[in-house]
Image (spheres, rainbow, N blue to C red):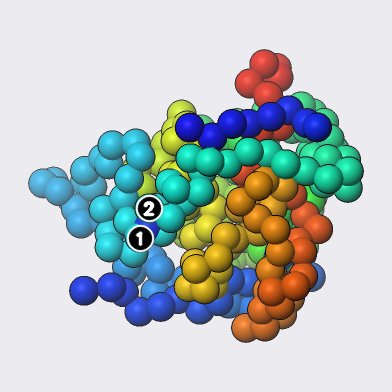
Amino acid sequence: MPVFQSKPKPAAPAPAPAKPQGPAAGGPNGGLAAQRAALQPKPAGGGRAQATPPGGAKSPLGKKVYARNQKRTAGMKVQMGAAHDAAADVFEAHWTKHRARYEQVAAKTDMPAKLIAALHWRESSGNFNTYLHQGDPLGKPAVHVPKNIPVFHKWEDAAVHALQMKKGVQNDLGVEKETKDPASLATYAEFYNGLGYHNRGVPSPYVYSGTNQYSAGKYVADGKYDPKVKDKQVGVMALMSRAKDDTPA
């Protein structure tokens, strides 16, 4: 099991590279259409998808990504330098203040509130005036991928839509509001950002920055990977370790 410390998965077509992260970054979001098609669960009787037990995936692609994340999270430790640690402190305070908003979206999507908060932080540093999809400003047509979304004026509405776009991934992994399996959470986050790092066989900084599973390597532009660049943002797994359960909702 991972150790969280407070501080000091015939194969589907290969998706496009992971998008550069942040509100100003564009680029393909890991081949959204291909990923959704590859991961869409088969309906059971009555048209309802059967639940997947925690800790696995049903699709070939999902299984492959999950297996890699299972190995990584098994030996994962939060390991941050001063800059990452300070940023994680700010996220922790943000979670404490805004947990109710994340819980509201979690209830509507059956997704873990901590994971939603960590994705929001990666996309726009927790800015509630942006789309959860990619960090573009609310109230305007999206500029970065995914662009083909409605114009939203309320963060919660946009967040629900963004997570519904990944419903196939969520169902494939069996992720629910109370999911705790680290490999499932890491795999969902990796699909959310894109599988460029998976295709290279390297850990995703979007997921693992701030842990002992990541040292360097980042997509700095569309399709441009630099193995020497180190992600300055804290990754989803390290962020979630700082979202305390005892915070009043």
The outermost residue toward the left is 45
Name the quadrant containing residue 81. top right
| Residue at 48%, 40% in the rendered image | 74
Left or right placement of residue 232 versus residue 170 in this view: right
| Secondary structure under the numbered disc 2 in the rendered image | helix
Please name whichever residue, 153 or 73, is drawn nearer the observer in this view of the structure. 73
**Above-or-below relation of 89 to 66:** above
**Where does residue 191 sit, x and y in percent of width and height?**
49, 60
Q: Is residue 21 left or right of residue 170?
A: right
Residue 179, located in which quarter of the rendered image? top left
- Reading the image, the residue beneath label 2 is 67
Q: Secondary structure at mark 1?
A: helix
Label 1 with label 2: CB-CB less than 8 Å = yes
Type of the residue with mark 1:
Lys
Between 42 and 58, the one nearer to me in the picture: 58
Question: Is 92 rendered above or below residue 75?
Answer: above
Task: Please say if 242 is above or below 159.
Answer: above
Q: At x 32% / y 68%, what residue is drawn? A: 38
Q: Name the disc covering residue 64, or none.
A: 1
